[in-house]
Amino acid sequence: MRSDRFGDRLARAVAGRESQLVLGLDPDPVRLWPAAVADPGNGSVAERAGEAVAAHCRLVLAATAEHCVGVKLQVACFERLGAPGWTALAGVIAEAQGLGLLVICDGKRGDIDVSARAYAQAYFGSTPTPFGPVPGLGADALTVNPLLGLDSLAPLAEIGRAAGSGLFVLVRTSNPGAGDIQDLVLSAGQTVSDRLAGLVRTLGGEPGGSGLSDIGAVTGATAPQHLERLREAMPTSPFLLPGVGAQGGRVQDLAAAFAPGPGGGLVSSSRGIVFASETAGGEPARAAAGEAARLRELAWQVSH
Amino acid sequence: MRSDRFGDRLARAVAGRESQLVLGLDPDPVRLWPAAVADPGNGSVAERAGEAVAAHCRLVLAATAEHCVGVKLQVACFERLGAPGWTALAGVIAEAQGLGLLVICDGKRGDIDVSARAYAQAYFGSTPTPFGPVPGLGADALTVNPLLGLDSLAPLAEIGRAAGSGLFVLVRTSNPGAGDIQDLVLSAGQTVSDRLAGLVRTLGGEPGGSGLSDIGAVTGATAPQHLERLREAMPTSPFLLPGVGAQGGRVQDLAAAFAPGPGGGLVSSSRGIVFASETAGGEPARAAAGEAARLRELAWQVSH
């Protein structure tokens, strides 16, 4: 069990590693680094795919971890491989934490209280059974979907907190369709996103010694025009900023996120790092390391 | 590959089985039917828990399937057991489909397009890999969260449709906190739920021969005051109505759901059926069958 709060752990990790870069891993089995599929073993098709996905993630982590403070794992990419995918996910989490990275599971979970509690057991806690407890994934943070309201988030916050882990609540996502619901204007004048930000602030309460809350927000890097307003609404929440690179977001536009300090913003890039060799040429590992170093430096400058 | 659309399959199943009852399974390893934990096998703790959960689901299905048209599986309850939980989920799906039931995976998934496609592969399609395709779970339907907008739902609808499967989009959920976001009033006068209903209608397009769309909506049975308005907004969508029983919803209040025909509403009850013996007394299986028969009859009356 970790002894302090996620916001404080995050602030310390960012300061210690001098990085706000989060490596996004959303492995597609037909687009893995070649070395990852070289030795697939003798298992079933799903087992071989799970092994290859895990090997790919290990290779990308080995190439880039020194430049990163965390890794964001797209749960869907593991889930689609069934039980072997889940085994791969657990293995990649252990590998990343062994490299000193914070692990954010990008699952966008959200459900009514009793089911939210089950998700919290899956990602942060453990599940009591007649045979003993089944440990969860031990993630440092989980992305969560707040459409079901505060009572759907509370069990995740509570069980996460008990484990020193945190949440990143979807507030303004990076995709083009985000505006369909999140940008709707309410009769009170705010947008739906503003109201989601209010839930984040309520749930976060008082931050720990670092000034960073353990309840963060997902605020896509593709729509930086919202960042100042959202930072005002959530002054102590870490912002997870996906969408840099392939989705079009630019690190230079994210300064508002860093108002509470260098740990206030986590810049996440997935395909831009993993497939850097497709534009930069050269070995996948060397190109990925180069792009990660570049993004890390850029974010550090913008935040200071 | 199924040859017709989910809405038509649903209408036919409801007519054939004379039931709109959906058994909800959200197995808690410390609250399983006693017979399910009698023979746990020799695996790891998680494997024994997964076996016990699957055994429990098989027992409940055997007791109640004749009264049901479908089963709703709470994915969180399997996910928290890791890989063995995923194996259990796949087994329960096969068991339920073997009994002629439609399987609704209650996962409330939702993500940006590329990740939504991965979830669609997990539940409806298959994932191409260098070693061959990895089949997904083959669910008949999945609950999805629309906070990320239309482009996040489209890949799920498309891949689901190709498999003859459907979606149930969260529109107005059954929990107390649902009002925090879903009931907010927009400057245009509608609520957020009304706007979500608009997405459902857009995504659904023209229904098949039965008049039922393959894009349904989750409209909690605990807030029947919204049903008439939502039925008007989504005239051809099947409504999944969770919250009957333990959460306080009453079948008698759900008539508006059935406007497009008997398949227009699916009444879902979980703990009310599974733990019926705790109030009715007697064997768990006999009490569950009795409660399922009662709810089935009640819904059939309300819909005719």
Image (spheres, coloured by chain):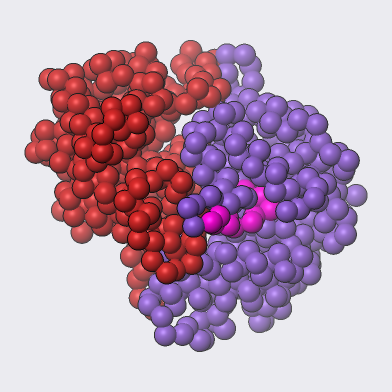
Chain colours: A red, B purple
Would you place residue A90 above or below residue A235 in this image? below
Name the residue nearer the viewer: B168 or A77: A77
- In the rendered structure, does residue B136 fall within the stretch colored magenta? yes
Q: In the image, what residue occupies the spot 52% across and 33% down?
A: B113
Would you place residue A188 above or below residue A211 in this image? above
**Bounds of the magenta span?**
B132-142
Name the residue nearer the viewer: B73 or B182: B73
Residue A11 horizontal/vertical position (percent): 15, 36
A94 to the left or right of B65: left
Residue B137 horizontal/vertical position (percent): 59, 57
Q: In the image, what residue occupies the spot 61% across and 46% down?
A: B143
The image quadrant of residue B155 is: top right
Name the main secondary structure of what is drawn in magenta: loop
Would you place residue A301 above or below residue B165 in this image? above
Q: In the image, what residue occupies the spot 37% across and 54% down?
A: A37
Inspect this view and state whether residue B165 appears: no
Residue B261 horizontal/vertical position (percent): 87, 44
Name the residue nearer the viewer: A154 or A174: A174
- In the rendered structure, does residue A136 fall within the stretch colored magenta? no
Residue A259 horizontal/vertical position (percent): 20, 21
